[in-house]
Image (cartoon, rainbow, N blue to C red):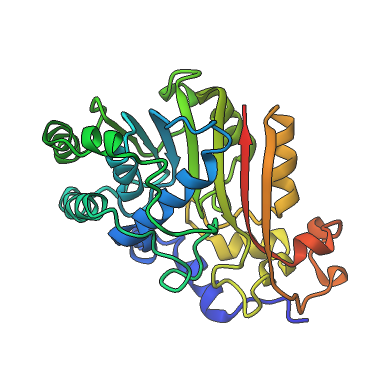
Amino acid sequence: MKTFPPLTVLFKGLITFIPGAYKIFCKGTGGTISSRYCYSVWMRHLVVTQGARNGIMPKVVGELGPGDSIGIGLASLLSGVEKYFALDVVKHIDVKRNLKILEELVVMFKNKERIPDKKEFPNIIPLLDNYDFPSNILTSEILFTSLADKKLKQIRKSVSNNASMEPMISYFAPWDDKNIISPGVADMIFSQFVLEHVNDLEKSYGAMFTWLKFGGVLSNVIDFQCHGTSSEWNGHWLYSKLLWKLIVGGRSFLLNRQPAQFHIDILERNKFKVLKTERFYRESKISIKSLAAEYATISYGDLQTTMIYMQAVK
């Protein structure tokens, strides 16, 4: 099995050691510039966590890694959330883009549009049994308040002010201190394809536990694929620590390369009660014996896991 990355991957890592090159090769995350993507992601997290919250709508939510926009958080505010915390490593916020996404989301909520499903976004999880607008959750009463002119004006003001410590939105980039959110204030913390990029997972899960109220829910989607660093979808587990360091280069983050069970173990160490783990699998052409030394004990299930949805409560 080939244990050396494509030369373009190695070149990209090495060139980021050059001052200024990082900005050229790290241009954003992509998905969250689409209002329909943001709507679909938020609604899925909202629907699948309602059982854990006994049908009670969250009032304070936090998102790790909002990416190129705070669109998912804006969708949460339009569905009744009163306070949204956005926590990122690199600042991507763009006022004009966020205002555009906001107005598109307002139309979608007013029209009670169906949640975009796997035909439109085949790689988004969690999956739902029903993609109709969840009127049983977002009742007419909730929407009347969340889409009222007064609230929309407040949201627009928060976005226009760069979402910096506004009453409805607080945006931190980079965040490196769990004290930026007061302990026990969040009803829900979520992330979408983010935790595979976080370098200090122990710190991040510990912070999430601190921020959540007792009974608060954690809802995370994690992608374990190689993100273009190998010709095999899970080939990043073949590389030695030294080779991986060269691939990452001068970037502040790329992939932490931790498998699914590692995340589950951290949840349990941090005293979360794990409610749900839904794995998605793909055949592996790589054998466990060919993996780098630090992954020699990985399970065959983890080797084949492309993505996982994890839900837990404090």
Residue in front for this viewpoint, 100 or 79: 79
Spot occupied by residue 100 in the image (x, y as percentages of width and height)? 17, 55
Q: Quadrant of residue 266?
A: top right
Task: Look at the picture and state if 169 lies above or below 1.
Answer: above
Spot occupied by residue 4 in the image (x, y as percentages of width and height)? 68, 77
Quadrant containing the C terminus is: top right
Can see residue 36? yes
Count up the numbered dots. Answer: 0
Quadrant containing the N terminus is: bottom right
Task: Look at the picture and state if 5 lies above or below 314.
Answer: below
- The residue that appears at 28% across and 58% down in the rendered structure is 35
Spot occupied by residue 222 in the image (x, y as percentages of width and height)? 58, 54
Left or right of 287, for residue 180: left
Can see residue 177? no
Residue in front for this viewpoint, 243 or 208: 208
Which residue is farthest top? 183
Residue in front for this viewpoint, 246 or 256: 256
- The residue that appears at 46% across and 26% down in the rendered structure is 186
Left or right of 147, for residue 259: right
- The residue that appears at 45% across and 20% down in the rendered structure is 185
- The residue that appears at 47% across and 28% down in the rendered structure is 187
Task: Look at the picture and state if 106 lies above or below 247.
Answer: above
Left or right of 80, for residue 53: right
